[in-house]
Image (tube, rainbow, N blue to C red):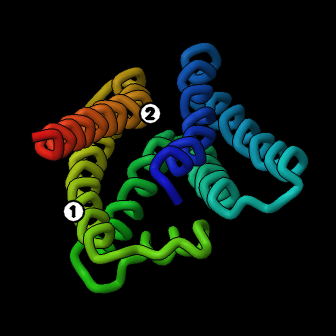
Amino acid sequence: MNSRKLLLQMLPGFIPLFIYIVAEEIWGTRIGLIVAVVIGLLELLYYLVKEKKFEKFVFFDTLFLVVLGVVSIIMDNDVFFKLKPAFVSLIACVLLGISAFTSKNIFLLMSKRYMKGVEFNEAMLAEMQKQLKIMFFIFVVYTALVFYSVWYMSDAGWAFVSGGLFYIIFGVYFVFEFIKNKIKRNQIKNKMNF
């Protein structure tokens, strides 16, 4: 699975979080949580109807949202709901850590599943390991920020950190990688012309 597809799959998981912020501001915590859980369930139904297939990632993301949302409603405390992005990021940290620092590259196995017939040479595998290590450290910092925002920031601050900041961080990272690779290609091209 490429990074763009992963980011696009994660985007729907942030919609209920943003809707919660708006609904909570207007109607209070309990109604905000109920609205967010309903939106999460509607998203899952939308994917089932629109795509006519069961999207595991969306299902588990929505299920996680619903479970934490229901616990938050029962406990009358929005902290459980707010922890959802932190838990998802923590899971990503574990998967990235295993893939980057052990011989069990989970992301390589996933990419082979989605890109059948594509062979990876040693240089590609080494680059993938390098990128996974960078992604791991980015996710560790991001996850720490999300946990921090749950406990020590306002709802608006938490919404920014757990949602928008994710896309800003990875947008900057991908732009940096794009520019770095373009410079590297130009240097190789210039060396070949001499």
Q: Which residue is mark 1?
A: 130
Q: Residues within 10 Å of mark 2 (few under 14, many from 20)?
A: some
Front position among marks 1 and 2: 1
CA–CA distance between discs 1 and 2? 26 Å
Asked whether residue 49 appears in the rendered view, the answer is yes
Name the kind of residue labelled 2 in the image.
Answer: Gly
Left or right of 76 on screen, residue 126: left
Name the kind of residue labelled 1 in the image.
Answer: Lys
Point out the image quarter for the C terminus: top left
Residue 42 drawn at (x, y percent): 80, 41
Q: Disc number at residue 163?
A: 2
Viewer-side residue, 179 vs 15: 179
Q: Is residue 7 above or below residue 25?
A: below
Residue at the spot 21% in from the left edge and 47% down from the top edge: 141
Q: Is residue 170 above or below residue 155?
A: below
Secondary structure state at the residue bearing disc 2 = helix
Viewer-side residue, 120 vs 137: 120
